[in-house]
Image (tube, grey):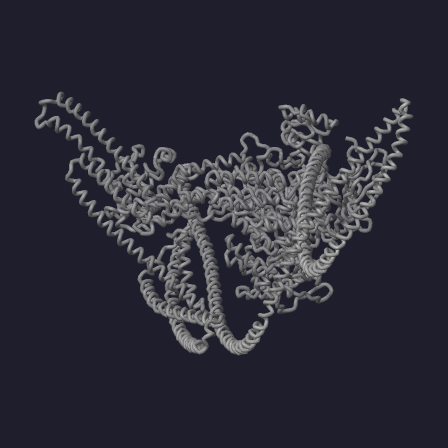
């Protein structure tokens, strides 16, 4: 693949950086092949230009995609290089707080320098049995892998833990050993696993010290072999140590300490047992004060010494030996304080009576003179003589320090030897797992002999590691059958040869040590001469001739030659050793005797610990031993290292590389420089390099197909997935060398997965863009349509609104206009009317005046007209006559003349035609004009006529009107004249009335003044009364309010206290029940272990045990209640027990006996404590009652005083009111007008209401008095009743109560306690007393009424029962006298009569119920009649058969015998079976068996019974019923021995069958159901009234009469608890393999989860293959459990508890795996989990179990799934998460957020700041820091009483049970 395809724009790369080692950058420009530089942009936005090397043209490392960052396995990274590894570790460590990461076969562990809650027992159980790749990286996963491979491959294993000082090697090794001890258990009861763990504090005390890098640094290497037997249980251990840092005993650098044990002794010097050691503060001793840091923060050395001493004791080192060890250690401290002074330049001296030397000599038992002599002198031996040489002060001091180091080394070796002895057992070792805790590669400023040996060991381990990694790679390629070439990896054999080969560094060092005058300088020169020119790995420093440099695999290290020879020789003055050997202190002598026998001065004893295969046999000769003792330290270390490498090569190694993140011990702080140094040194990068050189990325075909299906076209997908993947890869990747096809996997070279991920991301990005485009278009269009619809709707409504507003406005306008119109019309009309009236008045007057004037004028004119008429008539006639004469004359003259002229013209015109024509034409025109004129004149005439007519009409009307007005005025004038006459009389009357009015006004004023005065007085009096009444009302309201408030407060307080106490009692009860059930479990486990040991010991005498791995926690179901039969069995088996005790350890027997005794004592103490608590409760209750009576008496006295005071006040007020009323009545009598006034009525009403209120108060006082009296009597009777009935109420066994009864009893006790004076410290008020007295009175009255009603009802029922009994006896006597056929008729008739009477009574009581009862009765009657007819038919049929048989018998045997019966008699004889129903009716529900048949009964009914057949064919609980019926007969015959043996045999047989078939769910469920039914039967028929309420009268007759089996009920209840726990365990074993696969791994919703690239540690595929479990598998299994329990008749409440426990297991296991699997914490997985949970809820809904509490147990899982899906960015999101995840702890929430991993690039990671915000918000929560849920937790089980309605006499025993020897009674 060309670089131009990868180094494109926005590609991210890594560039070197001086501070951060590697820095991320992004390309801003595409790279081309001829470019000399890259254009980059850093993460902070800075643009830089990165120059490429012109020679190599090496491009910077590419960065992995974000979805690969934070992977569990570094080999899953597509680009495998140093920056990718460093960044991945940093992200996991800093952001996700994950300290473990896989790197192929290596587990990288980073020291967090904080205490993490990830090493608990719950975490151990979570990793147990899991595949290594399925869970998140952890030291427990490595330990589980080693344990699993040891069991599977039958090959020894090794765990190699290495790293720098302070990296956490010791802690990792400790946790690995803890895992083995917890998971495997031990093969014996010697607690080997505890001893193995106990060796840790001892070795830490004597071998660990504080350094500048670590507070608990191991200063030696150790290899612990943990031995296992053939069942893979721990049987012992063996420890080998390497190169103890002895120089630390005498010297410590600044800020460092000596070994811990010295400071522990100094801190405990004040203890009495350490007084003789003469110790004091650590600052007073030279060997403990040189580092000037005697205290470690957070460490208590006194407590640590106690832990060390306890560990010594556990390992068998007794107190005397421990004190001896501490004595030697104290002697070393005193020896270091011995001051040596100069005598001269060549000699030294110790002052006489040196206190510290004296203390040393006394502690070690040597003489002061000898020791002081040989501390300052030395004996030299030559061939001929021996002489003593003095030593200068410096050499003497070194001699003293050498002796201290030698003594400490001997002590160290002695302790290691005794630890190994304590860990060795006699059981043959089958295999072992070794844990190597060894120092990592070290380089300091000054490196000496210790660093040289350490780095030499690391070179050997690195070579072995490289070879193992290369071997695994080769095996993988060969297994997949792919071609491979030799991978070039770093081989450090040349460096190893430089150190250990012939003429190597160690060889030259040993040779120089043998030289008489050998020195470090001469040795250095030999090194230069030998290796400087011949070996490229050896160098000489430029500025030094006393040092050399070796090129190790990790780095170059410069070693200083000073001290090499001295440390290699490790010489000690022999005379000092002889002095110590002559000591009187036995332990010191033993130390040096062991030293002579040792093969190594460092304490490695080869061939111990039960191992023979890899041991080297030592030479037993003393000469050889002496030579071995003279071996140099380098030679010894080389030999021990070779033996270690031989051991490791013979095992399968597992590697743990510990990394120290910083040098300052800061929590979760990552220093890249230090981390890279250690990664290079520990071989992690070499693993990466080897992996990257081959094919590091590996996919199965199915995973590749699922991941890159998006890159395939539909036509490319074939049925053969392998061929499909091949075709696709050939298209996508052209270079075929970049991948290889194996048998099951596809192998990719480095970078190819990133390229495929890039193609996938591009394809998904394009698809996302297309989807986004379409979705956004759809959303935009939908939004547009929604907006458009909304706009149209808004417009429609707006326009409608506007139209309505306009219409409204128009209506209002029109209305206003109309109103205005009518208003104006009215106003105008009114104004017009006014004006009209005025005008009319004026017109009337004016017209009258004018009319009169006109009348006069008319009169005058009329007269004048008459005169003028006469005159003018005469004159006109005269003028007319003259004019007429003249005119006629003129006319005659003129006409004559005209006529003449016309005549003349006519004569002329007649002569011409034209003239006539013109004449005619003009005549026509004139005629037409004349005609028009005539028409117009006619019209004018008509108009004039009409006008004239109208004028005449109006004139006539006006005249008529004027005439009428005139008449009216005449009448008015006459009336005015009459009125004028009346005015005088009216004025006189008015004067009289005015006088009367003034008199009346004066009287009225007087009355008003009196009324005002009276009103003011009344109002004043009323106001005073109102004030008084208001005060009374206010006081009353205040009293009532205070009473109500106090009552409410008391009620709330009582309710709150009762609720809290009830909740606390329930919690305590559940805890006590859980503790009790846990004790039963522990007892069962111990009993089963005892039985297993007994069986195994007995079986060992016959055959050897089998090879199988079992769970060490497997337990049996034995109960602690073993009665006489068990004691008999123990007596019979005492001989076998003796044989067992011979074969097992005595301590085991003592421990078992002690444990059993403790358990019995504990149980007895619990019972005694319970009884004491009950007695104390009763005494306290009696004492409280006495005190309460005293307090109640005082309260009653106070109430009586208060009552008297109230009565006196009421009397006084009543008297005042009576006087006031009388005075008011007297005033009312004097003033007749006042009583009717409103003020008087109001006043009287107020007075009457006040009187009524006073009467009410008086009645209340009287009621209170009566209540007090009745209260006294009631309390007296109650006290008597309680004294009589108290034992029956409170002496109730807590274990017998149901939950409701327990709560009820707790409530009663709490109520009585609250009534005691302890809760009445404050003085009680009157209101409080009133409320309490009323409450008590009400309660007493209610109880009394209820008691009376119950007594009356019981009396009535008793009378009815007596009458019914008498009637039944009479009927029975009558029926017995009847024949069998008549008996049936009589019984039926009696039944019909009884039902009829009941029906009539029911009809009288309740008609509705009577109808239902009639229906039931009719049905019963019909059934009875049908039974009668059926029996009649059967009888007739049998009679016919008998007749036939009798005839045949008569024919066959006639005359053969005498006394032969007649056929009639033979017919009558077989009639006797008809009496069988009578016997069945009289059957008492008991089964009789013989004593010798008891074993047969138990065998057939319990041991050999098949649950499946019984559950299918017979009634549920049949064995329990049969056993109880047998028990009833034993009780009936009063045989206590039979009862005891039957119950004991039953219990033991159930235990035996459950032990034999305890893994069969059906068997356990069957016997749980029957045990509960047997327990219910014992309760139901016990005779206790509490259990007999639901019984029928017939069932009450079957109660046990002679024995009280309450104790046995407790035993059977314990047995039921054990069976329930075994049932839960059985279900858990079945469900456990299904849960993780079905709930997490399987894709219920296909295609949601994406498969990410995985590394060498392959996880379980989420794709369902054949045989894998799915959610349907879980649901089917749950349904199978439910149906089985239902078939067995298990109580419904018990089924609910079982289902709740099932769902708790499912939720807890799923959540725990989710919290431990980073690959499961994604958004898509949250969706899968929520869907799976919904399916489980649907199953609950289908089964009707939603209310059983099972859903609530899944709440943590539901909230975790929701947490994976919710938004995780802002503060609002954080608040929502905190309010949502209430069922999750803070640790779980933070863990999920840290583990959240995006599956695709489009998801975002959770930021660190957001997680910090969550932690800040949740820091106030008070909760357990535990991370995982307890999957082993079992809810306390209860068995609610469930009586059976089945009558015992109706039970039929089938013949299939083989119980024919039982006789029904």
**Farthest residue, direction top:** 1451
Front residue (pair 1258, 268): 1258
Q: Is residue 515 visible?
A: yes
Q: Position of residue 225 (x, y in %)?
A: 57, 44
Vertical comparison of 951 with 1106: above or below: below
Q: Is residue 636 visible?
A: no
- How many labels were placed on the picture? 0
Front residue (pair 1688, 406): 1688
Front residue (pair 68, 208): 68
The structure residue drawn at horizontal position 33% and vertical position 59%, both measured from the top left corner, is 1345
Q: Position of residue 842 (x, y in %)?
A: 70, 60
Vertical comparison of 850 with 1575: above or below: below
State the quadrant of the C terminus: top left
State the quadrant of the N terminus: top right
Q: Quadrant of residue 1116?
A: top left
Q: Position of residue 577 (x, y in %)?
A: 61, 57
Q: Quadrant of residue 1117?
A: top left
Q: Position of residue 1225 (x, y in %)?
A: 43, 76
Vertical comparison of 1683 with 728: above or below: below
Q: Is residue 883 left or right of residue 968?
A: right
The structure residue drawn at horizontal position 38% and vertical position 64%, both measured from the top left corner, is 1337
């Amino acid at each position: 693949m060309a670089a131009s395809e990868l180094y494109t724009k926005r590609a991210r790369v890594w560039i070197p950086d001086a501070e951060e080692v590697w820095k991320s950058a992004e390309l801003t420009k595409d790279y081309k092949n001829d470019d000399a530089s890259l254009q980059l942009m850093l993460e902070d936005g800075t643009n830089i230009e990165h120059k490429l090397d012109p020679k190599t043209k090496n491009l910077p490392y590419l960065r992995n995609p974000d979805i690969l960052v934070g992977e569990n396995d570094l080999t899953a990274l597509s680009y495998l290089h140093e920056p990718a590894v460093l960044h991945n570790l940093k992200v996991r460590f800093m952001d996700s707080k994950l300290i473990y990461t896989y790197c192929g076969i290596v587990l990288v562990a980073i020291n967090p320098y904080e205490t993490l809650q990830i090493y608990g027992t719950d975490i151990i159980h979570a990793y147990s049995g899991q595949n290594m790749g399925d869970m998140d990286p952890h030291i427990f996963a490595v330990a589980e892998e080693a344990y699993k491979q040891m069991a599977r491959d039958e090959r020894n294993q090794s765990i190699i833990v290495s790293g720098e000082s302070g990296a956490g090697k010791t802690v990792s090794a400790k946790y690995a050993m803890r895992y083995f001890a917890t998971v495997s258990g031990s093969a014996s009861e010697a607690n080997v696993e505890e001893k193995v763990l106990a060796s840790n504090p001892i070795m830490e005390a004597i071998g660990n010290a504080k350094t500048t890098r670590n507070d608990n640094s191991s200063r030696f290497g150790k290899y612990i072999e943990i031995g296992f037997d053939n069942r893979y249980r721990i049987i012992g251990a063996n420890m080998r140590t390497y190169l103890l840092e002895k120089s630390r005993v005498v010297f410590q650098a600044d800020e460092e300490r000596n070994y811990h044990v010295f400071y522990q002794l100094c801190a405990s010097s004040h203890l009495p047992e350490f007084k003789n050691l003469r110790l004091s503060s650590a600052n007073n001793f030279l060997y403990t004060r040189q580092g000037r840091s005697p205290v470690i923060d957070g460490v208590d050395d006194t407590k640590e010494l106690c832990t060390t001493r306890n560990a010594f004791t556990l390992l068998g080192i007794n107190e005397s030996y421990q004190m001896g060890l501490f004595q030697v250690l104290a002697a070393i401290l005193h020896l270091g304080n011995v001051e040596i002074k100069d005598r001269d330049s060549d000699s030294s001296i110790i002052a006489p009576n040196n206190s510290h030397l004296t203390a040393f000599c006394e502690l070690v038992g040597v003489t002061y003179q000898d020791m002081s002599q040989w501390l300052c002198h030395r004996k030299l031996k030559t061939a001929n003589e021996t002489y003593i040489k003095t030593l200068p002060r410096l050499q003497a001091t070194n001699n003293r320090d050498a002796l201290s180091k030698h003594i400490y080394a001997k002590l160290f070796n002695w302790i290691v030897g005794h630890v190994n002895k304590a860990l060795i057992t006699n059981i043959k070792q089958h295999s072992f797992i070794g844990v190597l805790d060894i120092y990592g590669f070290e380089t300091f400023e000054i490196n000496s002999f210790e660093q040289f040996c350490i780095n030499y060991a690391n070179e050997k381990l690195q070579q072995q590691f490289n070879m193992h990694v290369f071997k695994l790679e080769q095996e993988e390629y060969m297994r997949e059958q792919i071609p491979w070439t030799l991978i070039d990896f770093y081989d450090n054999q040349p460096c190893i040869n430089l150190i250990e080969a012939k003429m190597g560094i160690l060889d030259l060092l040993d040779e120089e040590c043998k030289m008489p005058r050998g020195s470090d300088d001469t040795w250095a020169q030999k090194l230069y001469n030998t290796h400087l020119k011949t070996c490229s790995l050896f160098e000489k420093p430029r500025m030094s001739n006393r040092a050399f440099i070796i090129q190790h695999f990790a780095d170059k290290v410069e070693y200083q030659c000073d001290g090499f020879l001295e440390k290699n020789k490790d010489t000690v003055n022999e005379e000092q050793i002889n002095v110590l050997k002559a000591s009187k202190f036995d332990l010191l002598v033993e130390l040096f005797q062991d030293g002579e026998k040792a093969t190594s001065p460092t304490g490695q004893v080869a061939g111990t610990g039960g191992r023979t295969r890899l041991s080297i046999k030592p030479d037993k000769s003393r000469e050889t031993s002496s030579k071995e003792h003279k071996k140099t330290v380098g030679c010894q270390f080389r030999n021990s290292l070779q033996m270690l490498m031989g051991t490791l090569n013979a095992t399968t190694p597992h590697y743990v590389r510990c990394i120290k993140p910083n040098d300052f011990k800061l929590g979760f702080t990552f220093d890249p420089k230090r981390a890279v140094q250690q990664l290079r040194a520990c071989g992690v990068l070499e693993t990466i390099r080897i992996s990257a050189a081959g094919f590091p990325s590996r996919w199965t075909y199915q995973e590749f197909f699922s991941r890159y299906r998006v890159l395939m076209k539909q036509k490319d997908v074939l049925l053969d997935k392998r061929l499909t993947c091949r075709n696709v890869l050939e298209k996508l990747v052209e270079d075929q060398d970049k991948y290889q096809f194996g048998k099951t996997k596809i192998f990719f070279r480095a970078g190819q997965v990133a390229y495929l991920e890039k193609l996938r991301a591009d394809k998904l990005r394009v698809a996302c863009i297309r989807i986004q485009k379409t979705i956004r278009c759809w959303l935009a269009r939908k939004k547009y349509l929604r907006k458009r619809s909304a706009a149209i709707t808004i417009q429609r409504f707006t326009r409608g609104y506007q139209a309505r507003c306009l219409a409204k406005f128009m209506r209002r306008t029109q209305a206003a206009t109309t109103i205005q119109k009518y208003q104006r019309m009215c106003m105008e009309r009114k104004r017009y009317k006014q004006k009209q009236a005025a005008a009319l008045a004026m017109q009337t007057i004016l017209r009258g005046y004018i009319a009169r004037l006109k009348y006069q004028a008319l009169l005058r004119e009329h007269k004048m007209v008459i005169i003028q008429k006469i005159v003018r008539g005469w004159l006109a006639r005269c003028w007319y006559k003259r004019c007429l004469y003249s005119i006629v004359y003129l006319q005659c003259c003129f006409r004559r003349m005209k006529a003449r002229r016309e005549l003349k013209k006519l004569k002329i015109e007649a002569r011409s035609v034209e003239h006539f024509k013109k004449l005619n034409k003009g005549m026509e025109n004139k005629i037409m004009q004349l005609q028009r004129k005539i028409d117009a004149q006619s019209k004018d005439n008509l108009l004039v006529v009409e006008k004239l007519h109208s004028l005449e009409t109006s004139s006539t009307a006006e005249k008529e009107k004027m005439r009428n007005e005139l008449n009216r005025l005449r009448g008015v004038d006459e009336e005015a004249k009459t009125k004028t006459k009346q005015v005088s009389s009216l004025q006189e009357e008015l004067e009289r009335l005015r006088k009367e009015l003034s008199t009346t006004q004066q009287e009225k004023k007087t009355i008003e003044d009196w009324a005002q005065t009276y009103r003011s007085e009344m109002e004043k009096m009323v106001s005073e009364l109102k004030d008084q009444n208001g005060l009374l009302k206010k006081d009353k309201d205040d009293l009532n309010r205070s009473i109500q408030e106090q009552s409410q407060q008391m009620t709330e307080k009582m309710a709150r206290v009762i609720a809290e106490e009830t909740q606390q009692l329930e919690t305590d009860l559940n805890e006590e029940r859980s503790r009790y059930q846990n004790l039963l479990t522990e007892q069962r486990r111990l009993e089963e272990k005892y039985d297993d040991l007994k069986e195994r010991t007995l079986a060992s005498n016959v055959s050897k045990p089998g090879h199988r791995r079992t769970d060490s926690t497997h337990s049996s179901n034995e109960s602690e209640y073993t009665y006489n039969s068990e004691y008999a069995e123990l007596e019979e088996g005492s001989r076998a027990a003796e044989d067992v005790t011979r074969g097992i350890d005595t301590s085991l027997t003592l421990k078992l006996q002690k444990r059993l005794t403790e358990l019995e004592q504990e149980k007895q103490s619990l019972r005694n404590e319970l009884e004491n608590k009950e007695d104390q409760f009763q005494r306290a209750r009696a004492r409280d009652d006495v005190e309460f009576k005293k307090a109640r008496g005082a309260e009653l006295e106070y109430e009586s005083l208060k009552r008297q005071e109230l009565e006196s006040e009421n009397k006084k007020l009543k008297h005042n009111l009576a006087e006031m009323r009388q005075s008011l009545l007297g005033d009312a009598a004097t003033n007749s007008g006042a009583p009717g006034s409103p003020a008087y009525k109001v006043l009287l009403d107020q007075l009457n209401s006040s009187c009524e209120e006073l009467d009410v108060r008086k009645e209340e006082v009287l009621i209170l008095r009566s209540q007090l009296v009745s209260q006294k009597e009631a309390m007296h009777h109650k006290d008597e009743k309680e004294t009589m009935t108290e034992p029956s109420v409170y002496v109730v066994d807590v274990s017998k109560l149901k939950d409701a009864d327990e709560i009820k009893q707790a409530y009663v006790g709490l109520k009585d306690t609250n009534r005691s004076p302890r809760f009445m410290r404050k003085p009680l008020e009157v209101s409080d007393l009133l409320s309490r007295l009323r409450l008590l009175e009400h309660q007493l009255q209610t109880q009394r009424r209820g008691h009376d009603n119950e007594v009356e009802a019981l009396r009535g029922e008793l009378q009815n029962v007596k009458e019914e009994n008498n009637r039944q006896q009479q009927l029975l006597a009558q029926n017995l006298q009847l024949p069998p056929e008549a008996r049936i008729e009589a019984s039926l008739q009696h039944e019909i009569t009884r039902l009829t009477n009941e029906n009539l009574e029911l009809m009288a009581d309740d008609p509705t119920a009577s109808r239902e009862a009639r229906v039931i009765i009719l049905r019963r009657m019909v059934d009875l009649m049908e039974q009668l007819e059926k029996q009649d038919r059967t009888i007739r049929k049998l009679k016919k058969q008998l007749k036939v048989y009798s005839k045949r018998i008569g024919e066959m045997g006639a005359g053969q015998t005498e006394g032969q019966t007649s056929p009639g008699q033979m017919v009558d004889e077989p009639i006797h079976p008809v009496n069988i129903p009578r016997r069945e009716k009289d059957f008492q529900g008991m089964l009789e068996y013989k004593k010798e048949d008891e074993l047969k009964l138990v065998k057939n009914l319990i041991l050999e019974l098949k649950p499946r057949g019984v559950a299918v064919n017979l009634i549920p609980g049949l064995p329990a019923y049969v056993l109880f019926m047998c028990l009833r007969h034993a009780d009936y015959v009063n045989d206590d021995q039979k009862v005891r043996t039957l119950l004991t045999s039953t219990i033991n047989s159930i235990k035996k069958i459950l032990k034999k078939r305890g893994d069969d769910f059906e068997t356990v469920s069957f016997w749980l159901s029957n045990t509960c039914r047997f327990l219910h039967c014992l309760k139901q028929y016990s005779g206790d009234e509490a259990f007999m309420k639901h019984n029928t009268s017939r069932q009450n007759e079957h109660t046990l009469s002679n024995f009280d089996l309450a104790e046995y009920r407790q035993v059977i209840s314990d047995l039921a608890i054990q069976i329930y726990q075994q049932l839960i365990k059985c279900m858990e074993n079945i469900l456990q393999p299904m849960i993780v696969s079905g709930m997490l791994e399987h894709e219920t919703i296909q295609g949601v989860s994406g498969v990410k690239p995985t590394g060498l540690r392959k996880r379980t595929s989420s794709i369902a293959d054949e045989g894998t479990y799915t959610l349907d598998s879980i649901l089917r299994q749950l349904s199978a459990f439910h149906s089985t329990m239902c078939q067995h008749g298990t109580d419904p409440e018990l089924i609910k508890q079982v289902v709740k426990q099932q769902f708790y297991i499912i939720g807890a296991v799923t959540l725990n795996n989710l919290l431990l699997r980073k690959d499961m914490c994604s958004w898509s997985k949250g969706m899968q989990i929520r869907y799976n949970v919904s399916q489980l809820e649907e199953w609950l809904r289908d089964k009707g179990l939603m209310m059983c509490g099972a859903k609530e147990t899944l709440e943590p899982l539901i909230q975790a799934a929701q947490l994976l899906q919710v938004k995780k960015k802002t503060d609002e999101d954080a608040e929502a998460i905190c309010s949502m995840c209430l069922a999750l702890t803070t640790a779980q929430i933070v863990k999920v957020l840290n583990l959240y991993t995006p599956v695709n690039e489009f998801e975002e990671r959770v930021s660190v700041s957001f997680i910090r915000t969550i932690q800040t918000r949740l820091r106030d929560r008070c909760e357990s820091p535990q991370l995982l849920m307890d999957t082993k937790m079992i809810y306390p089980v209860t068995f609610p009483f469930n009586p059976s309605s089945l009558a015992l006499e109706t039970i039929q025993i089938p013949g299939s049970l083989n119980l024919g020897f039982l006789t029904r009674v």
